[in-house]
Amino acid sequence: MKLVTFTANGKTSWGAAVDGGIVDLGARMKDIADVRSLLAAEAAGHGAIAKAKAALAGAKPDHALDAVTFLPPVPNPDKIICVGLNYAEHVLESDRASTEDPALFVRFPNSQSGHMQPMLVPLESSHLDYEGEIAVVIGKGGRRIPQDRAYEHVAGFSPYNDGSVRDLQWATTQWTTGKNFPTTGAFGPWLSTVDEVPADTKLTLITRLNGQEMQRATTDMMVHSIPRLIAFISAFTELVPGDVIVTGTPGGVGGRKKPPLWMKDGDVCEIEIAEVGVLRTPIKSEKA
């Protein structure tokens, strides 16, 4: 399934993207409040995914794709954990050394926007950069998850733009400020579950700015693999259904180009996972 969270006719709901639009599963499964609740119910052994598929079978779309406001597929995760310097080419362009363990930072939910919703260049900076990434959403939680069991804990994948306010990110050794301005990141359009894209699939990631390709990589190019990330992160914090792990960006970011290439008002950025879909976001300047 392609799970989505959206607003239509003034109401927020969740459902599945299908040919021709969106089936509102929130209206059909009133005991499940949102995508995070669906994943939690599935992890608890309540057969929630099978029930969602049953509700989806034969259903006609309730909304056209262009008639809804997309929200992040999981708008209310318990945790958003991001990985830095996880592709060798990006490590080189950043003039940094690879670390034995993953370099991690966190994002806040309000730093994200959904598909076709603007990413905002904040008033405090004009240095908003793109970072195409693959988001892994946790389905089954756990602590100290072994690498060889890690894929059992994956609910699915989604494109992610880990937008970065570079001057503020680079002002100190800590990245939190530059990664958390409201709506400077993007997540979506949907979460492709592992029944559609198996957890061990080699995924292809592409970033385009105004139609021009800026980044391209595959998951086998990661310094720290997805199973390694899940094992490492779950050693220090318990993962729960709906948690999001943003797995790092490849080389080609705008801030390392000469001269630097910043996203600006009127631009359109696309993050594609070839096996999942395309996240498209217009870039707007924040208004005072």
Image (tube, rainbow, N blue to C red):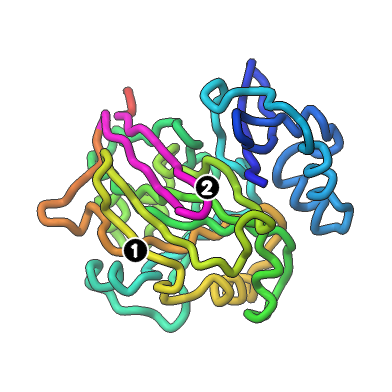
Q: CA distance from mark 1 to mark 2?
A: 22 Å
At label 1, counting other C-alpha atoms closer than 10 Å, the crowd grade (few under 14, some 14-19, many 20 or more) is many
Q: Do tag 1 and tag 2 residues touch (Cβ < 8 Å)?
A: no
Looking at numbered disc 1 in the image, what kind of residue is underneath it?
Pro
Q: Residue at x 35, y 79 (%)?
A: 98
Q: Which mark is residue 206?
A: none
Magenta range is 265-285
Q: Which residue is mark 1?
A: 250
Q: Residue at x 84, y 32 (%)?
A: 30
At label 2, counting other C-alpha atoms closer than 10 Å, the crowd grade (few under 14, some 14-19, many 20 or more) is some
On screen, residue 211 versus residue 111, left or right, reads left
The tally of labels here is 2
Q: x, y percentage for residue 4? A: 62, 38
Query: If you read the primary sequence from the N terminus, does the residue marked by circle 1 or circle 2 appear first?
Result: 2
Q: Which residue is mark 2?
A: 108
Q: Residue at x 62, y 37 (%)?
A: 17
On screen, residue 238 versus residue 187, left or right, reads right
Secondary structure of the residue carrying numbered label 2: loop
Q: Residue furthest bottom?
A: 100
Query: On the image, which quarter does residue 186 sit in?
Result: top left
22 or 170, nearer to the observer: 22
139 or 165, nearer to the observer: 139
Q: x, y percentage for residue 56? A: 77, 37
Q: x, y percentage for residue 264? A: 24, 35
282 magenta-colored? yes
Looking at numbered disc 2 in the image, what kind of residue is underneath it?
Phe
